[in-house]
Structure formats: C-alpha cells, structure tokens
Amino acid sequence: MSVPLEHDYIGLSDASRSSVESSNISSDSETNNVLNLKATELSLGLPGFSKNFEENGCCTKFEPKNFMLGAKRGFSDVNLDVNGGFEKVQGLKGDLVDGVVKVGEEKKKDAVPSAKAQVVGWPPIRSFRKNTMATNVSKNGDAREGSSGSGGCLYVKVSMDGAPYLRKIDLKVYHNYAELSKALEKMFSCFTLGQCTSNGVRGREGLSESNLKDLLHGSECVLTYEDKDGDWMLVGDVPWEMFIDSCKRLRIMKGSEAIGLAPRSVDKGKNRN
Amino acid sequence: MTDSGSTDPTRIPSLPEVFLKRTFSLINSTSDRNSLSLVCKDWYNYERLTRRHVSIRNCYAVSPEIVAARFPAIRSVSLKGKPRFSDFNLVPEEWGADVQPWLSVFVTAYPLLEELRLKRMSVCDDSLEFLAMNFDAFKALSMLSCDGFSTIGLEAIATHCKNLTELDIQENGVADVGGDWLGFFPENLTSLEVLNFANLGNEVSFDVLESLVSRSKSLRVLKVNQKVSLDQLRKLLVLAPQLTELGTGTFSGDLVSSSVNELESAFSKCGNLQTLSGFWDPSLLYIPALYPVCGGLTFLNLSYSVLGADELEQILTHCKRLTRLWVLDTVGDKGLEAVGSHCPLLEELRVYPDDPLDQQSGVSESGLVAVSNGCPKLHYILYFCQRMTNAAVVTVAQNCPDFTHFRLCIMKPHEPDYLTNEPMDEAFGAIVKTCVNLQRLSVSGLLTDLAFEYIGKYAKNLETLSVAFAGNSDAGMEYVMRGCPKLKRLEIRDCPFGDSALLSGLSQCESMRSLWMSACNLTMNGCKKLAQEKAMLNVEVIKDEDGDDSLANKVYVYRTVAGPRKDAPPFVVTL
C-alpha cells in the first residue's frame, strides 16, 4: 500500500519535491541559491541531529522507508536538479518553470543522493486536484477504521512563525526525534536563513537538558506541539512513542515566544560540537 | 441534394421563408446547423438568424464582433480560452483569454443573453459584476478551469441576477476571500436549479445555504464544498429530496445532531439521485448511509476519496447501474477487479493518482485488464498508472473495441513495458487498429516513431491527440500530420520533433483547431516559415525569459479569422 508520505500542504511550487527514494531537498522556491544555504540553514536543535549538510553538496540523504518530502498529494511544479543547478525555479505564485532536468537513477543508501526530478505539469493533473489532495489528508485512524488502505499514517500540521504557509508531515515516517528534526529543518529552511543552530548526537532519543540549552543559546527556534489536551508542550520531553501518540500539531516558535517553554538552567552541553 | 446531371438551379422548389425559419429554430445540433448553413445563401441566412447557441472553442479563432455580426439572436454562449496545457501550468499567467472583450460586445449585441459557459478563460471580479449588472435576462453561469476571480465576483452575481437558475463553479483558480457571498442571494430568489460551489475553500453560512435550498423548489443539482458537515448535509437532503446530482461535503466527522440511520433515511428519500460526488475524507462509518441511493446511480465520483479495494467493493455491490465511475488509485488493482465484477454497464472509468511519485502504490496493468474483462461497454478511459505492458493493452483493446477516448498516462516519462522492456508502441498500435471509433488519444511511456506510424495509419477518426516524452524523430509527427484527417487538436510536449515535422502538415494545420508544441526542437525560423505559408494561422511563440532567442520553446498555432491577437502580452510573439 502506499507509503506514508509527507504532505505538501499547498501543493504548489515548493521546490522540495524529491524522489521515491531517499533524498531530501531543502525547500525553496524563490531563489536559485537555496542549495547553497546549508551553512545558514535552520536547525532546531533536537537530539540526534548533526549539522552535516556537507555530505553531498546540498542534501543529506535521508533514511529509507521511502521517505519523501512532500508530494503525497500535491506535488510541485519545480524542476530540481539535486546535484547541481536547476533551471528557472517556480515562484510561489505559480509561475512557470522550464525545462526538464533528468537526474540520475535513485539509489537507496548512497553517498550521492539523487532525486527523480519532477517535471513541470507532469503527470497532467489539474492544480485544483493537486491542491485539494494536498489538504485532504487521511486522518489517523478515526475515519479509516477497517480500512485496507494505507493505515498507519499520522499527519499533523506544522506551522512556523512567520512562514506564509503551513506544512503537513506524517509522523509515522520517523522513528525518533532526530529524524523529525532533520526533516523539519529541511522543510523550513527556506523560511529562516537561520540563526538557529543545533548540536546533538545522532541517535539520541530524548531531548536532554543540555541540548535544549544549546538550542536556546544559539538559536531563535523552539519546536513545540499541541497535545491531546490542547496544551502546548516542548518537543522532546517524553519518549517518542508517547509523543506521536499525543501530538496533534507542531509549531516552530521563534524568538521571544520561545522563552518560558524550555528550562533555563545553564549547563554546558556535553554534546556540543 | 445534388443531381449530377442537372444544371437547372430552380429544380428544387424554394420553401417559404417562414417555414424554413420556423423549422430551423427547432434544430439545436450545431453540426446540423453548420450543414444547413452551407446549402445556399438563403439557408445560411435563415440559420444564422435563428441560432440561439454558439460554442466558440478557441476564443481567439474569431472575434466577438464577427460572432455578433453573423448571429444576432444568440442567447447562450460557450467559450473556451487557453490551450489545455495551461491546466498543467505550462502557460504563463497573463497569457490572455480574458472574457471582458466578449462581454463588452455582448452587452450591445446580446442584451438578452441567458447563459454563459466558460472554460479556461480569465475572468476577473469586475467582469462578473459587469455580467451581473448588464444582462437582465441572465440565468446560467458555469465556469470550469477558469481563473482570476474571487468570491467578490460571485457576490455580484448573486446580488444582481434576478433570474439565476445556474451557478456552477468547478475546478477554478478562484480566490475564496471569505465573506458571505451566498448571503447575497436575495430572499425572493427561488429559481435556482443548479448550485455548485464545491471549488470554494471557505465555509459558507449554513443558515443561508439552508434557506436558499429550502426555497429553491426546482433545485436539482447541489454540490457543496468540504466545509459542509455531514449533519448539515443531512438537513439539506431533507429539504431537497428532488436532487438529481449531489456533491457532498466532508463525509466524516461526528454526526452530532443525528444518527447514521437518520442520514440513511435522508438519502433514501432522494429517489432521483443519479450522480454523487464530493466525499472528501469519507468515513467508512457513514458510507452505508448511501446504499439506498446507490442502486439508481449512474455516475459516481470518488476521485477525491482515499478508499481501499474492500471499501470500494462494498460500495459497488450496491451500484449495479453505474455507467461512469471516477476513483483514486488507492483502490489498487484489487479495487478495479471489483469494478469489473460489479459494474457491467460501465462506460467510463477514470483512475486518478493519489500520489504520483510513489512508485509502489497505485494501479497497474492488471487492474485495467480486469475492468476491460468485466465491462464490455467501456468506451472512455483515463488511467494513471506507474507501469503497463503491451500485452495488457492489446487485451484491453480486444475486450473493448468501442473506445472513443483512450487516455493512458504512465506516470514516469519514457517508461517501457515493464515486463519486456520494449517500447509501448504495440499497445497504442493495438488501440488504434482495433478501436475504429477512437476520437481522443493520450499516449505515454517509451514510444518510438513506430507508435506514430500506427496512429497515422489507423486512427482515421482521431480528433484529439496528446503526446509527451515520445518519438525519435520528425518522422513520428509527420506520420500523424499526414495520416489523421480529422485531427482537430494536437498537443505535444518534450518530444524530439523539429521544424520539418511542423512544416510537414501545412494543409493539416488549416483544418486543425490548434496545435501546441512545447520543449520540442522548434526554431523561430521554422515557425516563421509556417506563419508565412499560412496566413490564416496565428503562429504564436511564448518566449522564455532567458534562453536562446532562436529557439521556440513554446509554440501555439491555431486557425483564426480574427487575425493576430490584439491583446497579446509581451511574452507572446505572433509571427
């Protein structure tokens, strides 16, 4: 059955569409320089994340499970050549992008991530349908009891303060906070030429106090979520399983709003780079 | 009536003018009328004076002045604008197809205009207001795949069109700026027969909607948007059991003020329902409420519903009379087997992709074959799939030789037969050889010039051909240009066809309505040559911002009696 995938909320020209296989591409639809912004990319400071964008030019390969940015429903109209430049990039308004850039074959765990480039206007599906499917999500469980369809999707909205539109992601695709954090970074990097930095050790499940400190000291961003009770909580306090069970939506908070959510003790992080 | 031996022009007695005009006014078929108008000058005149409806399939093929001059009595106009590939973002915004120039002429020529149906036109709010305020008899507005307007324009329509019977907003780029446009319908408006606002994103006031439905006793088509809840839908059904077409809102969530039984009971009172659509987020809990009406359904549109095979089958067991079915490919091949088993009367099937980039999901050749086995009356198919085989399509052609519309989209460009690794030439060859009534064909997958040779040789009734990522050389396109006498619309993208292919079909170009070629190998020189050879064609090149000026990346050619466009934006160059 279909693999749970990230949603492109708008289904527009976000330049973050990638292949079935494992590549992440930072999303940007305004400039040709997005792929060079790795040094200033948003990082949310969740554990397990390490700033390792240098691996392959511009993108880090993501873990398997066919994780794809965007495009489960609603896919972009931007041509993107992961390994180099790309042709004109589509503006958010939906201007045209020309040219088809064929990238190499997809490989699963490869040092060189390649993405199947998406072609403008292909497959030939009207924008209305694309946008509708992007916002019309299979809800987690509730409306799909007994469904033989893709059970086990858990889509939540992700908002970022200051960003013009929201995104949707499937939490079931990730296994830990690190993966989530990485994905969100990629997704929202176009909106912050970040002061956010993060440090962390790959593979850690819980957010340690020290990581939080690192997060807050150097950065402006905090990842929060709304739980079942409607309360806004800091991501990372509870075990991952418990988190995805109770998370209803995510919000990346910036600046002063972030103060007060995280503990304020001043330890030096042992995982600081 | 020709008598090859006689030269006596008075041999056929002329019929009285009154008689002819009266007779002609009863003839509605456009093609019949076109034939009548060719008989003689008198009949041409009688026909043009009695024509009530005109369909303009390319708004730049003729000018509004010319239309108004020829047909003075028009009450109903249907107008199509942009090339079809504009649906897929291949045409820049601001390209044109503005409806206003037409309205400006119609206001004097057709003050009694009643109906306007627009497809792929640019419509702004001011134009909608202009329409609403200047045409007192106006009744029916339908817009499909248009853009440029917002709910503010709809407010104007609601406010000023005192006799409105139809408001049909479908799949448009409409900006829903909120506000209460529905509330602008006056309390005394009771004439609505068709209301379709499924396209709009924001909530409408339910009280207003309820009141409108309640007083519109002639309402037969109601399609609401996703914001209308199940509870609300149930209430509407109770008010309008006479509906023949229903588009539901969201089909999930909690029924608060009633139960599933009550929902089912509301549906069961709708004995005239033939068409169902909507079903965003269908909840399996509530789908059984539909069963009472399923038996009478002829058209079921589930193309926005994420359903699995079993769920679809459950529904289809109740829908024996279906002739048209649209689904998402989440139903899989297994779901399509269910279609083949339960819908023997099926004539049209569309399978849309839920996730085009996921190569593991969706449907394949076996689903298509299963449907063709069970549905011998199938004549229209639109099928998005990840992979296909030649053998499967050959089988399908044999099972269903009556195809008039065969649109197969293998979603990965240049994808061969996945079992044999061969091009998909034989698949489409089988279709064109077997299906002699084929009018519309969309090809995909890895195709060589051979596929086009087949098309040129066999597809003698073909009117519309869509080609993408196919062919080897100019020869491919030349086969088609030379071989398909009835070809009206040809749209090509990303194919290695160059100037000589373009110029090979000079005579064809005149009889065709339009030709679109993008990302092929055309040069400006080639296009200029075409323009020089054929004065009655507009050869338009849509210029890239950068890119080689000698190349013509996007070319749109169409026949016209109106000369070059006067409203062409700077990036459209008419040669």
Image (cartoon, grey):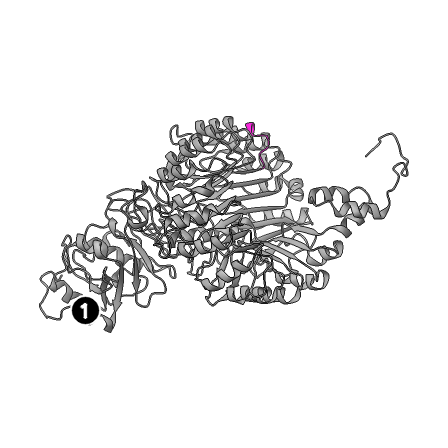
In the rendered image, the quadrant that contains the N terminus of chain A is top left
Q: Residues within 10 Å of mark 1 (few under 14, many from 20)?
A: some
Q: Is residue A102 magenta?
A: no
Viewed as shown, does residue B208 lie left or right of A173? right
Task: Tell me if I can see residue B423 in this picture.
Answer: no
Instruction: Residue at 43% x, 37% y: name it.
Output: B316
> Closest to the observer: A267 or B307?
B307
Provide the residue designation for mark 1: A261
Task: Tell me if I can see residue B348 in this picture.
Answer: yes
Q: Residue furthest bottom?
A: A256
Viewed as shown, does residue B301 lie left or right of A14? right
> Closest to the observer: B79 or B239?
B239
Q: Which segment did they paint magenta?
A: B433-439
> Closest to the observer: B205 or B46?
B205
In the rendered image, the quadrant that contains the C terminus of chain A is bottom left
Identity of the amino acid at label 1? Leu
Considering only vertical position in the picture, is A72 above or below B132? above
Considering only vertical position in the picture, is B62 above or below A256? above
Percent coordinates x, y for residue B272 in the rendering: 53, 45
Percent coordinates x, y for residue B155 in the rendering: 54, 66
